[in-house]
Image (cartoon, grey):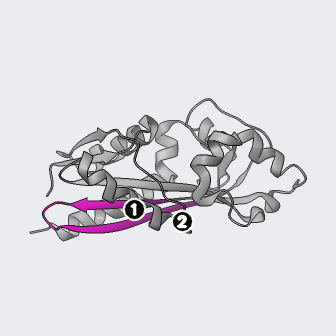
Amino acid sequence: MINHIWFATGNDHKFSEARDFLVQALPGLQLEQCKGDFPEIQASSLEEVARYKIQAAMDACPGNLFIEDAGLFISCLHGFPGVYSSYVKKTLDCDGILKLLGDKQEKIQRVAYFETCTCVFLEEMQEIHIFKGRIDGHIGFKERGARGFGFDPIFIPDEPAGNELTFAEMTPVQKNAVSHRTRALNHFKQWLLQSHSP
C-alpha cells in the first residue's frame, strides 16, 4: 500500500475535500498538496485534459501523484460549460449561468451534472489510471449557500433522495457523501486496495 501521494492542484478547496475523504478512507496515507499553475488544454473531454495536465505535473511533484479535472454539464446548453467550466466560472460566474437559463422555469429544463476525472500516476507501476465520478442534479434559480466553491451555489444534487440544498448549503460531510469528487476518489481507493492486496 502506498503511504504518500501528491494532489497537484492550486485549488485549496479541492485539496481539502480530497484530504477529508482519503485520510479517512486510507488510514496511514499522507496526502500533500503540490501547488502549481498546471496547463489545461482545450479538448473535448475531461479525460484528455487530465492526461495532459498530469504529464506537466510530474516534473513539479515527483513520486505518487494525482490530478483532476471537473466540469458542470448542463443538458439544455448542450453540455456547456463542461470542459470549459474553470474558464466560464472566471468569466461568467454563477450569475452568468443563471442568466443563460433565465427562460427555463421548469426543473426538468435545468437538468445538469457534475463530473470529475481523477488521473493517477503511481511511481512503482509507472502507469496512469483514470477514475471518474458523477452526480446528477439541476441548476437552481438563484445562488444559495456560503460554503463550497465554483458552481456549488447553483447546483442542487439529486442525492440524497428529496434533497433541495445546493452544494454550497451542505456541510462538508453532506457534500462529500454524494459528490462527484468523492465518487472518483472512492473508485481510486477500491482499485488501490485490490491492486495492493496480499
Which quarter of the rendering shows the C terminus? bottom left
User: Closer to the N terminus: mark 1 or mark 2?
Assistant: 2
Amino acid type at image mark 1: Tyr
- Let me know if residue 123 is in the magenta part: yes
Residue 136 seen from this side: no
Front residue (pair 87, 32): 87
Question: In this picture, is 38 found above or below 75?
Answer: above
Q: Mark 2 points at which residue?
A: 43
Mark 1–mark 2 distance (CA, rounded to whole Å): 10 Å
Point out which mark residue 140 bears. Answer: none
Task: Report helix, strand or loop for mark 2.
Answer: loop
Q: Mark 1 points at which residue?
A: 52
Amino acid type at image mark 2: Ala
Which quarter of the rendering shows the N terminus? bottom left
Spot occupied by residue 93 in the image (x, y as percentages of width and height): 69, 40
Task: Report helix, strand or loop for mark 1.
Answer: helix
Residue located at (20% from left, 61% from top):
122
Front residue (pair 180, 48): 48
- Let me know if residue 152 is in the magenta part: no
> Where are the magenta residues, as a range?
116-136
Q: Do the residues labelled 1 and 2 touch (CB within 8 Å)?
A: yes
Question: In this picture, is 180 found above or below 190?
Answer: above
Tell me the quarter of the picture where residue 129 sits. Answer: bottom left
